[in-house]
Amino acid sequence: MMFPEYRPRRLRQTEKFRALVRETTVSKDNLIYPLFAVPGKKVKEPIGSMPGVFQMSVDNIVEEAKEVFDLGLPAILLFGIPEKKDSKGSHAWIKSGIVQRAVEAVKKAVPDLLVVTDVCLCEYTSHGHCGIVVKEKKGVFQIDNDATLELLQKAALSHARAGADMVAPSDMMDGRVGAIREILDDNGFEHVPIMSYAVKYASSFYGPFRDAAECAPQFGDRRSYQMDIANRREALREATLDMEEGADILMVKPGMPYLDIISLLRQEFTLPIAAYQVSGEYSMIKAAAQNGWLTEDAVVHESLIAFRRAGADIIITYFAKDFAKASV
């Protein structure tokens, strides 16, 4: 009996059939929603470069957290803009700091919502850099890496004491994961995991975030401590160092321009991988949608699928609430 030559065919079936064989999915459980806490009461200040995102006082942060939880999202990521800034960023670790107060209030109101805190100094320093600046002259400066580690330890510990479920150091100082792990363990917070911004590029996609967090550098830039956008192998070195120092989750930031890096880390490490869909990515999609150039919901879903397909377990995105509402 003669059989016809086999010809591979595409699956052209119903949506239900396509869902049955779909290789990659994204759900609310994969998402973390970032929030920006500011001093005051009843504050909900729109961020001009990020439509639909706000700076909020603690009372409104709590209401937002309740909505996030009711939508089925598992976690928020808190950033803080302090009342005062100084050269060392001292409001990053004070007990009455904006993030510390927000953590306490959210955990009291929504105890089952995971609260992750960004650990960095850039929002708190008068110069906008992520560490202690020394020898600044006409825009030429150095960061005192080791002195900065002590301050990052104090900030992380203050967040844990306030009730943070996880801390996320984003400063890119050498040795900060090990230093934070040490101080957390020494003070009885062995259970608090570290989601490290392990691979954070000196990207042009952060512009709107610097409006939101009021943390643009007052001189120079952050290329001396963030990664060169051209480097791939360096990502493995950075991630390996953080893993060896005790990181529980490795993050890649930004997201879409660095899908190859997410995929690379997924192949090399068994730790969970997080991707940050940063402000510039968010604002580009929003702007194009507002101009009628693309369909927002479809593009958001496609972008989140891309992160998952590349290997991300967790996606930090300003679209988390919109995605959750569309999924109801």
Image: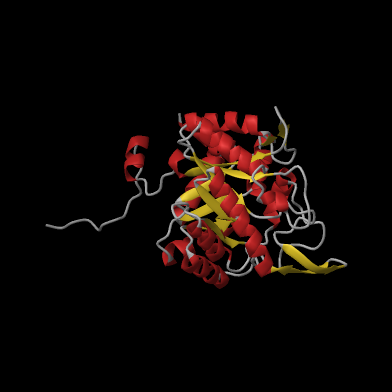
Q: Is residue 59 left or right of residue 76?
A: right
Residue 326 at x, y = what percent? 50, 31
Q: Quadrant of residue 103?
A: top right
Query: What residue sits 63% from the left and 43% below the top?
Result: 99
Residue 261 at x, y = what percent? 53, 63
Q: Is residue 294 visible?
A: no
**Outermost residue, front direction?**
187
The image shows residue 196, relative to residue 108, as above or below, that is below
Query: What residue sits 51% from the left and 49% below the top?
Result: 166
Query: What residue sits 51% from the left and 61% below the top?
Result: 181
Query: What residue sits 59% from the left and 49% below the top?
Result: 158
Looking at this view, is 243 or 303 the one in front?
Answer: 243
Residue 28 at x, y = what percent? 46, 39
Q: Assign the N terminus to one quadrant of the image.
A: bottom left
Looking at this view, is 299 or 61 the one in front?
Answer: 61
Looking at this view, is 263 or 3 the one in front?
Answer: 263
Q: Assign the C terminus to one quadrant of the image.
A: top left
**Outermost residue, left direction?**
1
**Outermost residue, right direction?**
138
Q: Quadrant of residue 29?
A: top left
Residue 308 at x, y = what percent? 46, 50
Looking at this view, is 166 or 158 the one in front?
Answer: 158
Q: Is residue 253 visible?
A: yes
Task: State the count of labels.
Answer: 0
